[in-house]
């Protein structure tokens, strides 16, 4: 497989499932890494939406032949990623100690919810559970209601995928100095907790006295969304005085009021609510275009690809194909195609394995795991 990008030449084996690990390796693929996803067993393949730029093989890791095939792949790999509960990879002949004997400079990354140590290391969990245990969920949502779940973006993708990708790239860089590999214990609960650094300090202060009352959670009328005449929304982030003044004047309101104290906020909210309700989202988008007031239209997911700013930066692409990367000046990232067909034969043949060896190593189990979202 020929790749381009800053990670061109880096070979990644991905044995992770669901979303956090596969999204991390998809980002590495966007950056030019050659990613081979190792499937097999009841779990099957990862979600299709995190499969671009990869090739897929299926191995029976409960057999000696399957484990031997994996070890031959590892001998040529720079990075190995897995997301099993602690100890499971060891039982499959894919633990760190097993694989570093084959490839001493291997970067081995385990992505789990609770990490490799601690009393909850073996517990099942999802994004909502990790947010609950980091204090983040308690800050999200209205004052007189339950916490609001921010999809599974925070712990799974930010605290898990992005932290894992960063850790892998950092370990690859360190290896250029030491020549040694290492083990990376990436816990989503740790990543989510790290993102609470600022908000942890704000909790219980006048900036965030309780859920729903944080300035950054919508309590401030100049940092929230307002409905427009056509039932759509505009997002307002006019925290600084100069942006607030620009917001006020662009809306055609008179005499900019003081932003603080909080006793001013009900009146500000009433005026902003009435003003935004007087025009459509499209009208306000045009009016605020080029105005430094931190005001943006709230786009539906299927509208993002048509936004003129997004199109200017990334061209005529759809959202799922866009590499979520900075724009590199010399080694641009690129979104690979999604090909979930089975490449086991071609990949293992390239390692010199015979047809009989490949047949013995390949897994043909019908998957029962979640590989795409069902119709609901």
Image (cartoon, rainbow, N blue to C red):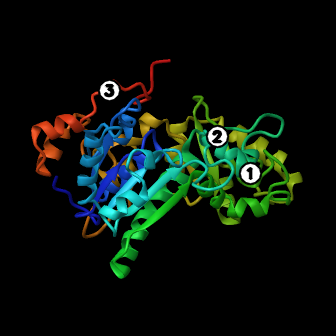
Q: Pick out the residue farthest to the bottom.
A: 177
Examine the image and state in which quarter residue 17 appears. top left
In the rendered image, residue 156, in percent from the top left (x then y), is placed at 54, 46
Which residue corresponds to mark 1? 135
Q: Earlier in the sequence, mark 2 or mark 3?
A: 2
Which residue corresponds to mark 2? 128
Q: Is residue 334 visible?
A: no
State the residue at coordinates (34%, 69%).
105
In the rendered image, residue 374, in percent from the top left (x then y), is placed at 45, 22
Q: Residues within 10 Å of mark 1 (few under 14, many from 20)?
A: some
Q: Which of 33 and 277 is in front in this view?
A: 33
Examine the image and state in which quarter residue 181 appears. bottom left
Q: On the rendered structure, is 264 left or right of 329?
A: right
Distance CA(mark 1)–CA(mark 3): 41 Å
Q: Which of marks 1 and 2 is nearer the N terminus?
A: 2
Q: On the rendered structure, is 193 left or right of 210?
A: left
Which residue corresponds to mark 3? 365
State the residue at coordinates (56%, 60%).
292
State the residue at coordinates (27%, 28%).
364
């Amino acid at each position: 497989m020929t790749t381009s990008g800053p990670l061109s030449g880096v070979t990644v084996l991905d044995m992770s499932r669901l979303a956090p690990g596969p999204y991390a390796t998809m980002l590495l693929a966007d950056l030019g890494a050659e990613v081979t996803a190792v499937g097999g067993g009841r779990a099957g393949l990862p979600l299709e939406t995190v499969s671009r730029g990869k090739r897929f093989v299926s191995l029976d890791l409960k057999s000696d032949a399957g484990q031997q095939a994996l070890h031959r792949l590892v001998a040529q790999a720079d990075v190995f990623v897995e997301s099993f509960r602690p100890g499971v990879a060891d039982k499959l002949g894919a633990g760190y100690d097993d694989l570093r004997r084959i490839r001493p400079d291997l970067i081995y990354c385990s992505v789990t919810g609770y990490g490799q140590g601690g009393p909850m290391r073996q517990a099942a969990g999802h994004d909502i559970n990790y947010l609950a245990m980091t204090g983040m969920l308690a800050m999200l949502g209205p004052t007189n209601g339950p916490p609001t779940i921010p999809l599974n973006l925070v712990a799974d993708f930010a605290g898990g995928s992005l932290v894992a990708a960063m850790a892998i790239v950092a370990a690859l860089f360190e290896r250029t100095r030491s020549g040694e590999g290492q083990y990376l214990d990436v816990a989503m609960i740790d990543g989510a907790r790290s993102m609470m650094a600022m908000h942890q300090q704000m909790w219980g202060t006048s900036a965030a006295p309780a859920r729903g009352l944080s300035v950054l959670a919508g309590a401030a009328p100049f940092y929230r969304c307002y409905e427009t005449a056509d039932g759509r929304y505009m997002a307002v982030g006019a925290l600084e005085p100069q942006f607030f003044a620009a917001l006020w004047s662009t809306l055609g309101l008179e005499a900019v009021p003081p932003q603080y104290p909080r006793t001013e906020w009900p009146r500000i909210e009433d005026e902003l609510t009435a003003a935004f309700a007087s025009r459509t989202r499209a009208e306000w988008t045009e009016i605020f275009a080029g105005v430094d007031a931190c005001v943006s239209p709230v786009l539906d997911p299927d509208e993002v690809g048509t936004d003129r700013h997004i199109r200017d930066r990334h061209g005529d692409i759809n959202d799922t194909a866009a590499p979520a990367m900075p724009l590199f000046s010399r080694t641009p990232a690129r979104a690979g195609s999604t090909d979930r067909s089975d490449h086991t034969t071609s990949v293992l043949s390239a390692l010199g394995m015979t047809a009989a060896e490949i047949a013995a190593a390949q897994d043909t189990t019908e998957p029962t795991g979640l590989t795409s979202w069902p119709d609901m």
